[in-house]
Amino acid sequence: MNARSWLRWGFRVVLVLLVLLLGTGLTLRVYGQRRLTAAQGLSDQVFSGLDPDRCAPSVLASEDGATPLLRAGAAAWSASEQDVRFLGGLSVRPPSDWSEEERRRARALLAAEATALELFYRAGERRPDPLPVAPLREALDNSMTFLAFMRSGRILAVHTHLALQDEEYEQAAGSLAALAHLATSLERTNSLLSLLVAGGVEKLLHGALQPLVEDPETGAERLEHLATLVPNEDLFMRWRCVLQEEYTRIQQSAEQEQAGDDGSRPLPLRLFLHTLGPLFEAQMLDVFARLATAIDEPFGHDPAWITGRSRWRDGFIASMFVPNLTGATARVQHLMASRQLARTALALRVSALTSGEYPQDLSVIPGAGRPDPFTGDPLVYTLEGDGSATLSSHRMAELWNDPRVGGDVADIAPNTWRLSAPPPTTRR
């Protein structure tokens, strides 16, 4: 075969490869467009019921709301980083495990924080409102704003426990109200990071409420007031709002980057993005839409959203987000489970003080009969022989330690509530 024949055959091979390459690219783009259409349909179905007004983030802080004081309080702590870590370490341990030396040191540190505590007390007297958008965008870059709020929640929780031990109930009430307002404000803010920090703060609130709820000296009137401190933000709705906001943010970032392309990118890269762009977008949108409904499927039942991930279905880019998002889904469920336990424990104590005994089952307590949103199991309610009762969710702590959920993050949610017997004077 002469050189001309080799050249002719080489040209044919290149032509065939080029046709195959173009055909494959066209097929992938058409497939991506179809996947995108299907994903948009699923997204519309999942997110269509959201109230735009409730999902819309706040732009400016309300002058009469708690936000300005919460921010000022978070910035007013004067303790060193070492002391903050010490107080944070106490907040994730039961107060019964604190040594006398630790209590003494904590009291000395908090005695120097009168300004920050006063700001949080005043915030607790105001209306909780969403945190404004602009600072959140900055916080997404360095997390410092949310770190300050998480730190504040831990310090306030320690202060509450110490105040209760010292029978300084007015100071304890101020810290509890501040914790409740901080959690509620964070939960009303459309940010995934904000929602996760809110979960930590609210669970610290539940832990701080527990000694008062279990104390036989706590009366019905105070218990009813404590019940008002437990946030009532609809977390099912907020989770969907947050995912919609997160996807919109990612999409807008990609669009801005594409609009800013001045043609300096290599031609192969531009062709690659043009061909696979719709498929990447479809996979991302599909992941967010499926996780929006995953909040209804308890982590404890090993649902498909935690066990059935596929790189082909989700895509390599989307798969980088999936582990963090599935972990966030489980953490929000854990928060809902902790809230259900706290609300049920408070309602049971009030019922016992009103009627003289605990009910025979949880059917009389609104919302208590639903399965635990995290484990998927019914709450375990036991009546003891001395007239007291125990309420728990047995697998909460075990599942929290799953690396896909909490990992190394301490479990600060109380999963067992031991409710004292009502006084003899109220018993039938």
Image: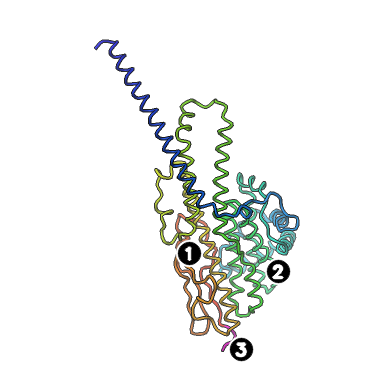
Circle 1 SS class: helix
Disc 1 to disc 3, how far (Cα)? 37 Å
Question: Looking at the image, is mark 2 or mark 1 earlier in the sequence?
Answer: 2
Q: Quadrant of the N terminus?
A: top left
Furthest residue to the left? 1
How many neighbours does mark 2 have within 10 angstroms: few (below 14), some (14-19), or many (20 or more)?
A: some
Percent x, y for residue 155?
A: 64, 61
- The residue where tag 3 is placed is 425
The amino acid on which the numbered mark 3 sits, given as a three-letter code, is Thr
Q: Is residue 101 magenta?
A: no
Kindly report which numbered mark, 1 or 3, lies closer to the viewer in this rendering: 3
Query: Would you place residue 171 above or below residue 286 in this image?
Result: below
> Measured from the top left, where is residue 402 in percent x and y?
45, 58
- The residue that label 1 is drawn on is 397
> Where does the image place residue 141, in percent across and percent down from the top left?
61, 44
Foreground residue, 332 or 58? 58
The magenta stretch spans residue 424: yes
What crowding class fits label 1: few (fewer than 14 Cα within 10 Å), some (14-19), or many (20 or more)?
some
Q: Which residue is mark 2?
A: 171
Confirm or deny contact between disc 1 and disc 3 (CB under 8 A). no
User: Mark 2–mark 1 contact, CB under 8 Å?
Assistant: no
